[in-house]
Structures are given as structure tokens and as C-alpha cells.
Image: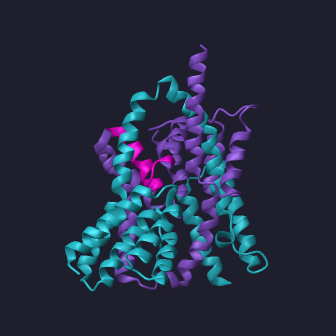
Amino acid sequence: MLLTLFITFFKIGLFTIGGGYAMIPLIEREVVERKGWISREDFLDLLAIAQSAPGVFAVNISIFIGYRMRKTIGSIFCALGTVLPSIIIILAIALFLGSYRDNQIVENVFKGIRPAVIALILTPTIRLASKAGLNKWTWWVPVVTALLIWWLGVSPVWIIFATIIGAILYYIFKLRKA
Amino acid sequence: MNAVVIYLKLFWTFFKIGLFGFGGGYGMLSLIQNEVVEKQQWISNSEFTDIVAVSQMTPGPIGINSATYVGYKAIENSGMARTEAVCGSLLASFSVMLPSFILMLLISAFFMRYKDHNSVQTVLKWLRPVVVGMLAAAVLLLLNEENLGAFNKDNLQLYVSIGLFALAFVATYFWKIGPIKVILLAGLFGGIFYSLI
């Protein structure tokens, strides 16, 4: 089991190109759909948790899934699997290939990959939206959140913290009333 | 400078970056620049730009990629051997992960224990739509000139990029093709197409 966790996350780490969000479609495919380790709803919760904690988003996600599967030792294997491909590749570049960046073919390959990766993030966004409990009262929440982050440059961390505080106040208010 | 002192400084600097780097890789990059280029002066500004480019072009989280690369360069630039530089890169990668590792373990344990409690359920119910918006914002932010090609400058690349974006979406959403296959095919296409024209 630990080895499966490691290999799964090694594969995910190897194809996470362009930052933590690029990891989301890979996790959705491997962990949610294929392995069924967590449900889509839990995946949404996990994204909120991983984003509100400091550190590397992708590593945080893998730590959480690893902990769910096999406690602390599971999270160590998942985190190692996620980061080992990058460490090996970057070390190889630092040691042997100083001019990797100027390689025209490599640049061309990435010109093709970059737009595809954005679409790969859009797909789980739509799939997760159907699991977010959106209705005629709450549909505006994702829209406003996206505009705040995209248009006004507000950090997602603040929005998550504000939402948590709002939810707790609402909960206390409801408890008092009851 | 004494080797042990450099390693300790490397550990402490990247531990801090891991602890205060909120909001994913890009939020972390400005922190790395501030600590590593301006305060410690381990690498130059142009080396830092190289690191950002290399991190974006290689697989893996940007925070880990840049820590590995800076750890290597910092030791190499201080005149130590290559094997020691490899140790430096491993140390930096480990240090940047350590704070989030400890915090995430605590959060995960708390979450597993109390996730069925009404208060936690309320918070999660409120958070889910927000997370969807957060993901949508990531898509919008990535749809930029750097990733697609600039309008009126490299129009051909822009049109090809929009085509690839649409095709990749259809392939994953409707045809249920796996993301790894899509990445490999898009890379193969880019490598052949842009090299031929």
C-alpha cells in the first residue's frame, strides 16, 4: 500500500507542469476516479485545507491524502513521491545542463503543453462545481470569489479565512437562536 | 565561510520560506527572491530569473523546484564542491517542506477527528463554493500572454494555443482522456509543429 501511494504520487509529481494547480486534474484522475481513495466532496474540502495552510500547495495535498490513507507514514511516502521527480530533474539540470532554458525544441514542446494544462484545470473545476452544493442562493459565491482573485488580486488565503470566520459566526448565531 | 554555517543558514532561510509562503508557488517566489537574492545574496537577480524559468518548464511544484535549484547554486557560488552543492539542494528542498509537513499533519489529524461535527460541516459547506471560484480564478489567471502567445505579436501561436486549449478541454471533459496523455500529446504536437514552421 505504501509503495502504491509512493508510485501514484511520483507519477503525479512527474506530470505536474506549471505549479500546484496543474496537479489537480492528475489527482482527480488517479486518486478520485481510478483508485477511489477519496470522494469529490472530500477533494473539495481538501483543496480548501491545502490552500489555507502555508507551504507548497501540491505537497500539502499529498500530505493530507497520505495521512487519510495510512496516517503519518502514509503522508511521508506521498510527499516524497510528489517531490522526488522535481528534485531529480532539477539536480540533473543544475549538474549537467546549464543551457536547458535556451533549448529551442524544449521551448517548443512547452509552447504546446502550456495551453493544454490550463484546459486540464478547467475540467475538474466544472466537475467539482457540481459537487459544491450550488443552488439559486449560492451560485454567485464562486463568481465573486473568482473575480476577487482574478480582477482585484485578492489572495485566496484571505478569502478562505474570511469564509471560515463567517461560517463560525453563523454557526454560533444559529446555536444561540435554537 | 564555514560549511556548517552555510548549511544552517540554508536550512533556516528555507524553513522560513516554507512557513510564510502562503498561496502556492507564485506567492512563494517573491519570498524566495527577498530572502535569497536581497538578504543573503546567494544568487544574483539574473540567476533568480533563470530559476523561475527552469521551474516553470520542469515538472513538479514551483516551490520545490526553486528550493532545489537555489540550494545547489548557493553552495556552488560560495566556492564549495559539487557534491556539497547536491547536499545543499537536498537540504533546501527538505527545509521548505518541513513547516507545511508539521502543520498539515496537525490539520489532517484535527480534520479526520472532527469532520462530522456540525461546526466543521458548516465551515466546509461554506468553503466548497469558494474553492470552485478559486479554481476558476486559477484558470483565468493562467490564460495570459506568456502561456498563450501575445495578441498582434505572435498571432499564429495565439490561435494554435486557443485550439489546443479547446481540444484539451473536450478531450478531458467529454472524451474522458487522462491528463497525462493530453500533456504528452500536446508536448509532442508543440515540439513538431513549432519546430517545422
Residue that appears at 71% across and 52% down: A147
Q: Can residue A30 be seen in this snapshot?
A: no
Q: Colour of chain A?
A: purple
Q: Give above or below for A37 relative to B93.
A: above
Q: Is residue A65 magenta?
A: yes
Q: Which chain is cyan?
A: B
Screen quadrant of the C terminus of chain B: bottom right
In the image, residue B80 above or below residue A119: below
Image quadrant of residue B131? top right
Residue A168 drawn at (x, y percent): 55, 30
Q: Please report the bounds of the magenta region as a residue range.
A: A52-70
Q: Position of residue A176 (x, y in %)?
A: 57, 17
- Side of A32 relative to B156 (left or right): left
Pick the front one: A78 or B187: A78
Residue A21 % position (x, y): 55, 55
**Would residue B152 be seen by someone viewing this image from the given angle?**
yes
Q: Vertically, is A134 above or below B81?
A: above
Prevailing secondary structure of the magenta residues: helix
Q: Residue at x 37, y 69 (%)?
A: B68
